[in-house]
Amino acid sequence: MASPNGERAVALSLQLAQAHQELRRQINDIRTSVGHRKLSDDVLVTHCLAFCTALTTHHQGEDDGMFAQLLRERPDLTTTVAKLVEDHGMIASILSRVRELADRATESRGPALEAIGRELDGLAAIMESHFSYEERTISEALDDETPGTDWPDQVFRFGTT
């Protein structure tokens, strides 16, 4: 029988995968909308900016909460966490470009939205690789009864588009 902390850790592992799945859904919805012009430019830009905020909040919660807690409990994960934090920096750079393009799109329309679509395509590929790696490595650590503290809200509860 699993301990209460172990059950909570497994639940956190599942929540991590669910949070990633929601972020995947959001970026795919936005990419589809950009590609097919399903929404007005203003609505697309708003959804895009909301997604950027959600992904940033998720990663900040991981960096400041989950990863810090994991390293206290599992110092053997230092290399893994360093790679994930490095990925977060790369993703943050792409999100910054998306935000700049979104600002331009509100002024110029068409061409800026096409550029946003290209950035989102690249971001989606990087996110998929990052999330898959994180789910394999960090979920395993969470499943090994790493206790959770106050970080889950930062990691799992972000705004939706």
Image: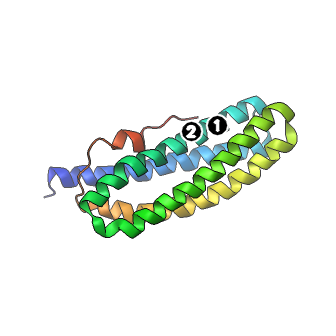
Q: Name the residue under label 1.
A: 49
| Residue type at the position of mark 1 | Leu
- Residue at left offset 76%, top offset 53%: 118
**Which mark, residue 53?**
2
Question: Separation of disc 2 and disc 1 at Cα?
Answer: 6 Å
- Quadrant location of the C terminus in the rendered image: top right
Q: In this view, does 161 lie to the left or right of 59?
A: right
- Residue at left offset 47%, top offset 65%: 83
Secondary structure beneath label 1: helix
From the top left corner, tell me how far across and down residue 59 is, in percent: 48, 49
Q: Which of 151 and 15 is in front in this view?
A: 151
Are the two marked residues, 2 and 1, in contact with CB atoms closer than 8 angstroms? Answer: yes
What count of labels does the image hold? 2
Coloration of the structure image: rainbow
Q: How crowded is mark 1: few (under 14 residues within 10 Å), some or many (20 or more)?
A: some
From the top left corner, tell me how far across and down residue 131 is, in percent: 50, 59
From the top left corner, tell me how far across and down residue 94 is, in percent: 65, 52
Q: Is residue 11 left or right of residue 39?
A: left
